[in-house]
Image (spheres, rainbow, N blue to C red):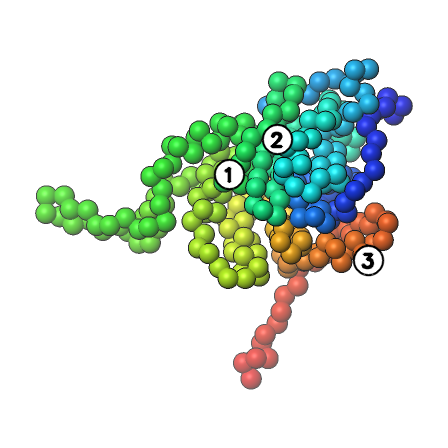
């Protein structure tokens, strides 16, 4: 909240590991020691918040503080469902950017149950998310309705078709996915996330699951320069700054960044034991890409 204007105070119940941004202490993408995952996702054009007032002051949070509050206080989606609106998200600015952050939230627990929470019409609305996926605008229910436009998609290749005795073969593998949207808009990414996660074949180990998850997420990488806007006469490129996988069974969080594609793993409970009662930051800007020279292997 603005200095001296009040706001919610609370004591953290659970330890958390994950990613913050803009040198903030608030998590954007993280897992707690009980295996609850929470991620904030940009929700421009749709998120609305009430103003801070005497009526909501004692339970007011800024939007960018919401993920941290959820992770600090709850262990399961069931608990979140019971208490997600105990607070009020108000129109408080994120001081590092000088704006109120428009965002919606995905929450997943170790059972696989998932929900989406959205601040629309100045209140919090909650949706069950059986497919577990989320992108950005518009609203979650819109994305689920739009998914019906792609019921023709299948991982199975299309069989040959005969027209007046002429047999037509699909041109290579992947014919069942013909028409899958490949652009970077949130609706197109939502379709790809739903299709790729649902068509993934079962694997045997947690390591294989993590590898599979990163291969799926690789298809969402935005190369630097492929998406851009013009702000105040300057090019503002949008790109994938980090990609992370939360393992809610083993309570690990694995991440790679744009500048360092090597996978870095945090065992949440081990990290919390090492940190003690402190808040510890690792500066990802200090990470660098490493390349293994295997030239000597040809001797």
Q: Position of residue 281 (x, y in %)?
A: 80, 49
Q: Which residue is mark 1?
A: 130
How packed is label 2: few (under 14 Cα within 10 Å), some, or many (20 or more)?
A: many
x then y, percent, for residue 87: 74, 26
Specify the quadrant that holds the C terminus: bottom right
Classify residue 299 as left or right of residue 122.
left
Secondary element type, mark 1? loop
Asked if the residue at tag 1 contacts the one at tag 2, i.e. Cβ–Cβ closer than 8 Å, the answer is: no
Foreground mark, 1 or 3, reads 1
Q: Decide which of tag 2 and tag 1 comes sooner along the chain.
A: 2
Q: Nearer the viewer, residue 135 or 107?
A: 107
131 vs 28, nearest the viewer: 131
Looking at the image, which is closer to me, 208 or 77?
77
Question: What label does residue 274 carry, if any?
Answer: 3
Q: Nearer the viewer, mark 2 or mark 1?
A: 1
Q: Which residue is mark 2?
A: 117
Q: Separation of disc 2 and disc 1 at Cα?
A: 14 Å
């Amino acid at each position: 909240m603005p200095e001296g204007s009040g706001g919610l105070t609370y004591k953290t119940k659970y330890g958390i590991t994950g990613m913050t941004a803009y040198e903030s202490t608030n998590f954007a993408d993280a897992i707690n020691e009980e295996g609850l995952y929470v991620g904030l996702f940009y929700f421009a054009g749709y998120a609305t918040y009430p103003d801070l007032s005497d009526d909501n002051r004692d339970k007011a949070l800024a939007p960018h503080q919401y993920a941290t509050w959820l992770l600090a206080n709850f262990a399961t989606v069931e608990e979140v469902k019971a208490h997600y609106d105990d607070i009020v998200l108000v129109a408080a600015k994120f001081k590092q950017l000088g704006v109120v952050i428009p965002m919606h939230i995905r929450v997943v627990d170790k059972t696989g149950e998932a929900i989406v929470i959205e601040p629309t019409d100045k209140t919090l609305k909650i949706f069950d998310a059986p497919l577990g996926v989320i992108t950005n605008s518009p609203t979650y229910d819109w994305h689920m309705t739009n998914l019906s436009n792609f019921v023709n998609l299948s991982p199975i290749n299309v069989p040959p078709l005969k027209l007046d005795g002429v047999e037509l073969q699909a041109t290579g593998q992947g014919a069942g996915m013909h028409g899958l949207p490949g652009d970077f808009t949130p609706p197109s990414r939502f379709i790809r996330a739903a299709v790729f996660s649902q068509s993934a074949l079962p694997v045997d180990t947690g390591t294989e699951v993590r590898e599979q998850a990163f291969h799926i997420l690789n298809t969402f990488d935005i190369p630097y320069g492929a998406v851009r806007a013009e702000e105040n006469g300057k090019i503002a490129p949008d790109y994938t700054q980090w990609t992370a996988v939360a393992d809610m069974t083993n309570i690990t969080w694995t991440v790679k960044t744009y500048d360092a594609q090597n996978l870095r793993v945090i065992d949440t409970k081990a990290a919390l034991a090492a940190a003690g009662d402190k808040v510890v930051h690792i500066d990802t800007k200090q990470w660098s890409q490493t390349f293994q020279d295997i030239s000597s292997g040809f001797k």
